[in-house]
Amino acid sequence: MILNELGQLIRRTPILTVANGLSLARLILLVPIYFLLMGKDGQVPTAAILLICLGWLSDGLDGFAARRLHQVSELGKILDPVIDKIFVLVLLIILTVLRDFPAWMLAVVIPRDLAILWGGLYLARRRKTVEKSGLLGKITLNLLITTVVAYLANWSVLVPWLMTMAVIAAVISTWDYARFFFQALRETL
């Protein structure tokens, strides 16, 4: 039922847009990143870091392209944050499995992202529109990707600080999303 209603939302706007293509390209980048990080020698190829940065850059470009080309769509409003979460989550899983990244970061990110995803889908169903991502969520995303890049670049002095800031931002943005969710829920009752 929820998927059917979301499908109706999505069908109201264009699907094949430059912005949506940029969002989907972020997912495709995960494949070469994974293979580059699988290397047995323990070295981090510069290409892996560059591809992560390219994915990170595409996150800003997709929103810019959507606005500039007048291609803002309901699908794009769903795709962009979902793909952001998948991109970061898969990067953290890859690093945890292949590169001894602290698993506790996954314990922070997974429940947060699942709760935000569920809440966003629920509100989209109730309100018949998709809300855009919040600034605090974008800050959290940027801190998480900065942490990943610093970890891979072996900037060991920065990594603990970045992890701490990312966790603090995740907690604050989760609170902000929860506040927004319950306020929006009250408005729809």
Image: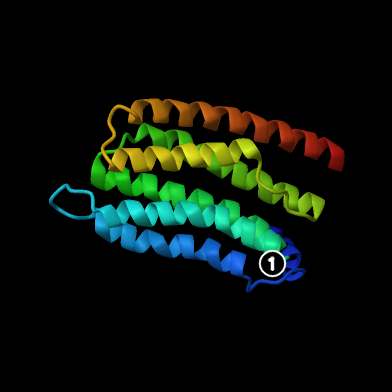
Name the residue at 25% across, 47% down.
98
Most distant residue in the bottom direction: 16
Q: Residue 91 in the image: x percent, y percent? A: 38, 49
Q: Is residue 15 above or below residue 157?
A: below
Is residue 48 or residue 38 the one in the foreground?
48
Is residue 189 or residue 176 the one in the foreground?
176
| Quadrant in which residue 119 is drawn | top right
| Quadrant in which residue 112 is drawn | top right
Q: Is residue 41 left or right of residue 125?
A: left
Q: Is residue 104 above or below residue 40?
A: above
Most distant residue in the left direction: 41
> Does residue 162 appear anywhere in the picture?
yes
Q: Is residue 78 above or below residue 4?
A: above
Element type at mark 1? loop
Q: Residue 14 in the image: x percent, y percent? A: 70, 72
| Quadrant in which residue 147 is drawn | top left
Name the residue at 23% across, 53% down.
45
Q: Is residue 1 above or below residue 106?
A: below
Quadrant where the image shows the N terminus:
bottom right
Q: Which residue is mark 1?
A: 69
Give the class, few, some or many, for how many residues have Cα within 10 Å of label 1's Cα (few <14, many ≥20): few
Quadrant where the image shows the C terminus:
top right
Q: Amino acid at mark 1?
A: Leu
Name the residue at 79% across, 39% down.
184
